[in-house]
Image (tube, rainbow, N blue to C red):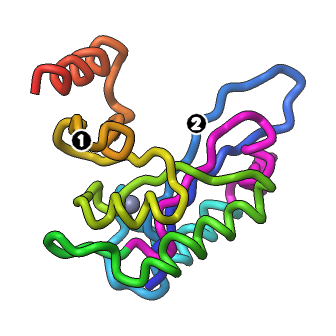
Amino acid sequence: MLHLFIMLIFLRAAPQPVSVPVLCYHNITAGHAHASSSLYISENELLGQMRTLSDSGYHSICPDELHARGHTIGCHTWDHPRASGDQGLPGAERQLYQSRETLEKITGSAVTSFAYPFGKWNEAIVKQLQENGFKIAFQLSGRSTSKFPQFTVRRLMVNGNWNGPRLLQEMRNLQLK
Ligand SMILES: [Zn+2]
């Protein structure tokens, strides 16, 4: 099974600018280890979707183009390991250094931001990040801590079904917790 975090932006050649969503794929699986869901898609289904988009006039933007357009490119490890307890990420050399170096080669710029796999963080992982030159890291649950504010920044998975007021409410709910 391949674990990847891929964010794709598709453009469509059109006389007028059109708005298209950013497509986020989290886990692309070889075989059928998982049923497709909002977090998983099989290789075959992904290729089918890409073929349909391509046939309909869409094309993708690669990370280097995304970076050139002002987006931040950050690490999410090499293959999404799960840290246990208070332990650091297993295989930090590959997970942090190698994945960062690969993105830096693609973008030609320093990569200093990181999103914890499964949102899970602990002090050992923060230390690994600091030793590998990361400056900011994003978690998925809980509050930012005063000890490591830059390494416990909260992110919010935004549901595509939310309207504006619902998004605002979800953000305010987080501030109250
Ligand atoms: Zn992830």
Which is in the foreground here, disc 1 or disc 2? Answer: 1
Q: Position of residue 16 (x, y in %)?
A: 83, 20
Q: Position of residue 137 (x, y in %)?
A: 41, 48
Report the residue at 80% width, 41% height from top.
68
Residue identified by numbered label 2: 21
Give, as a single range, the part of the protein colored magenta: 52-80
Report the residue at 76% width, 49% height from top.
61
Q: Where is residue 171 in the image (x, y as percent from the top left)?
A: 26, 22
Q: Does the residue labelled 1 lie within 8 Å of ligand 1?
A: no
Q: Quadrant of the N terminus?
A: bottom left
| 156 is higher (above) or lower (below) than 4 | above
Query: Which residue occupies the foreground of this view, 152 or 57?
Result: 152
Three-letter residue code for mark 1? Lys
Q: Where is residue 93 in the image (x, y as percent from the top left)?
A: 50, 80
| Image mark for residue 147 | 1
Please rate how many residues cluster around mark 1, counting C-alpha atoms within 10 Å: few if below 14, some from 14 to 19, many from 20. few
Spot the residue most to the left. Answer: 177
Report the residue at 40% width, 67% height from top.
128
- Judged from the image, the secondary structure of the residue bearing numbered disc 2 is loop
Q: Quadrant of residue 33?
A: bottom left
Residue 28 visible in the current orientation: no
Q: Of label 1 and label 2, which has the lower sequence position?
A: 2
| 12 is higher (above) or lower (below) than 75 | above
Query: Which residue occupies the foreground of this view, 35 or 150?
Result: 150
Report the residue at 42% width, 84% height from top.
91
Three-letter residue code for mark 2? Pro
| 80 is higher (above) or lower (below) than 140 | below
Residue 100 visible in the current orientation: yes
Q: Is residue 89 left or right of residue 74?
A: left
Q: In which quarter of the image is residue 167?
A: top left
